[in-house]
Image (cartoon, rainbow, N blue to C red):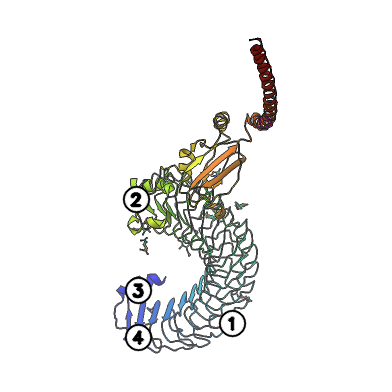
Amino acid sequence: MWFTFILLLPQLTLSAHCPSGCACNNRGAAKCIGDISDIPPLDPKTTFLLLLQNTNIKVLKDRSFQSFSLLLRLMITHSAIDTIQPEAFYGAPQFRSIKLSSNALSVFPPKVFSEQSNLEQLQLDGNQIVSISSKLFEGLVNLKELDLSKNRISQLDADVFQNLTELIYLNLAGNQLRNLPKMLFHNLRQLESLVLSSNRLETLESGSFDHLSKLCFLSLHKNQIREIPPRLFWHLPSLLNLSMSGNQLQYIPAESFYFLPNLTMLTLFKNPLISLPDQLMGYMPRLQELYLYDTSLVTVPWNLFANMTNLRFLNLHLNEKLNFLPKDLFCCLPNLNKLSLKYNDLRALEPDLFSNLTSLEILMLNDNKLESLPATIFSNTPRLEKLDLSCNHLKYLPGDVFTHTRALNVLSLSGNSWKCDCSIMGIAEWIRDNPRLVNDSDKGVACYEPYHLQNHSLQTLTHAELKCGQVVSQTMIMTTSIISTQVPATSTPQSSTASSTNARTTATSTAPSITSTFATTASRFSPTSDHIYIKQGNDYNNDLAFYEKIVLDNGPEIVHNNYYGGWVYLWSVPSTGPFSGFMTALYIVHLVTGVVLIVATWYALYRLHKVMWMLQKVTMGDNQRIMTRRVRRFSQTLEEA
Ligand SMILES: *[C@@H]1O[C@H](CO)[C@@H](O)[C@H](O)[C@H]1NC(C)=O
Ligand SMILES: *[C@@H]1O[C@H](CO)[C@@H](O)[C@H](O)[C@H]1NC(C)=O
Ligand SMILES: *[C@@H]1O[C@H](CO)[C@@H](O)[C@H](O)[C@H]1NC(C)=O
Ligand SMILES: *[C@@H]1O[C@H](CO)[C@@H](O)[C@H](O)[C@H]1NC(C)=O
Ligand SMILES: *[C@@H]1O[C@H](CO)[C@@H](O)[C@H](O)[C@H]1NC(C)=O
Ligand SMILES: *[C@@H]1O[C@H](CO)[C@@H](O)[C@H](O)[C@H]1NC(C)=O
Ligand SMILES: *[C@@H]1O[C@H](CO)[C@@H](O)[C@H](O)[C@H]1NC(C)=O
């Protein structure tokens, strides 16, 4: 309505009936600006609309408008009015609008509007009103719009709005209200907008909004609300916008936002929320945008967004404590287009976290503490175009992590702590092959460690620099000398791929040949049981305990390693598999045979020794006898001769 008036302004012309300082037009609108201290003497027969702006009027005197029997809309704004006499509007019951914004009014005579049963619009914003008599609005039975914002109201009587049954818009923003009587809005059954933002509300009474079945907009932001009663919003089926941001909420009762089927906007940001209940959001198919930032949440329930099936923009960011996202959190957002998770405290993400976000185009993950990402995390987001991973703690990314993001055209990777060992080659080669996708490579997508490669661009890394392809570990399968030592792998420059594919299965020369034969047999017989691979720290794993340690996965139960001269030796006795029983038996047979052989050898040696000794003795005796006999025979022969 004010707008209509403003449209008329160009047609205002000075006329004979128009006092100086005023502009009047032939449709009955008059506008007076400047040094006026009372209502100007306009033609009462032609004035329908009167606008007085930036005037010096201080007092609205009794029956000021009695002669203006056709005046429908009155605006006296940005003036100095501080007093309204008790009968100021008497004699002018035809008023439709009264606008007294931006004056210095603090009190109103209780009955000043009692004749204004035709009034539809009353704007008293930007004054100094401290309190309102419960009789003030009693007669305004046709009022549709009431603006009391930007005053100093700290308290309202329960019955102050009682007769305003036609009210559609009520603005109480920017006051000093601490609480609201439970019955304050009960008669406002036509109310569509209720603005209570920027007050000092600390609590809200249960049932405060129970009769507002036509309410579409409810603003409660920028208050001090610490808690809300359960089911506070359950009787607001028409609600479109609900703002609760900028309060002191730490908890919200379960099911608080149920039965709001038409909701299109819900704000909860800037609350020190510690946790949210498992059942909070009812079906809200029209909600398209959600902002949840500046909270103290550490995590959120997995189904928080499950009922917001048409969400397009989700800004769950700037939550400096948020460090865990449940794997199904984004399960049910098939239309989500933009997801911002930036400036949280995320350290790791679940591999399936984004697996249902088939419409996702923009994903902001920058400024978190991510150290790596699961290889399959983007395997189901084919429409992803922009991805920001800058300013994390990324040391490593799987080389195939972007294989499925065919639409990707802007990727930010700077500000990370890349660890340049062989495992980085996959992603380094991907960057080299897709240089135009990385929009911040000039800002530094460079190694952080080891020190001698610091600031070395990932794109230009070579296998030679990383000393890749070198055989750095040996896998030996032996059945003897079982020594078990846990070895830190930090000093062993190797990667998961390098060690699993390049590791040679050899028996060293020190191992007896029988063992080497056995090893070959073992690996041929049970190919799965000796499937050993080494997981290193920069492989995806969020458990810090696993970093910088050799982790053996899916290996045989009895796996051993030893660290010698920069080499890691692994060997195992297969304990499962189809031949394990046979192997163990064979092993025992070998062992027993060995012992038996040793004992038998000793015994044999002993016997041999004894026999030899006796033989020697016997031989010596025989020799003597033979000699004697020979000597005797010789002497006999000599005698005969
Ligand atoms: C306004 O409310 C009062 C009670 O507060 C009631 O007595 C009166 O009849 C109402 N006025 C109109 C015009 O409805
Ligand atoms: C929700 O919105 C639709 C479309 O604007 C409207 O037809 C329907 O009446 C609304 N539902 C409620 C409960 O107000
Ligand atoms: C209500 O929410 C919609 C959608 O978010 C927004 O465009 C609109 O400006 C909001 N209206 C009010 C009065 O807050
Ligand atoms: C979705 O809302 C309905 C009520 O509208 C509720 O019964 C259901 O539990 C909600 N689902 C989730 C996952 O919160
Ligand atoms: C993905 O969405 C479909 C249907 O919308 C659902 O059946 C499935 O459970 C969802 N998957 C995940 C991982 O939540
Ligand atoms: C790279 O793209 C992101 C958006 O994904 C943008 O915020 C950033 O400013 C861009 N950086 C440069 C250096 O252009
Ligand atoms: C890498 O760059 C940073 C900042 O430019 C510098 O402080 C650091 O000394 C550099 N490191 C090496 C090894 O050059």
- Contact, mark 1 vs mark 3 (Cβ under 8 Å): no
- Do tag 4 and tag 3 residues touch (Cβ < 8 Å)? no
Any atom of ligand 3 within 8 Å of the CB at mark 4? no
Which of marks 2 and 3 precedes in the sequence?
3
Q: Please give the residue where the numbered disc 4 appears in the rendered image.
A: 34
Q: Earlier in the sequence, mark 4 or mark 3?
A: 3
Q: Position of residue 572 (x, y in %)?
A: 59, 38
Q: Amino acid at mark 4?
A: Gly
Task: Indicate yes or no whether the magenta region holds residue 34.
Answer: no
- Residue 293 drawn at (x, y percent): 50, 63
Q: Is residue 534 above or below residue 102?
A: above
- Tell whether label 2 touches label 4 (CB within 8 Å): no
The disc, 2 or 1, on the residue closer to the chain's N-terminal end is 1
Return the residue at label 2: 459
Q: The disc labelled 2 sits on which kind of residue?
A: Gln
Does dot 2 land on a helix, a strand or a loop? helix
**Which residue is under mark 3?**
27
Which of the 4 image quadrants contains residue 417?
bottom left
- Upstream in the sequence, badge 1 or badge 3? 3
| Left or right for 206, reference 111 | right
Crowd rating for badge 3 (residues with CA inside 10 Å; few <14, some 14–19, many 20+): few
* Labels 3 & 2 near each other (Cβ < 8 A): no
Disc assigned to residue 175: none
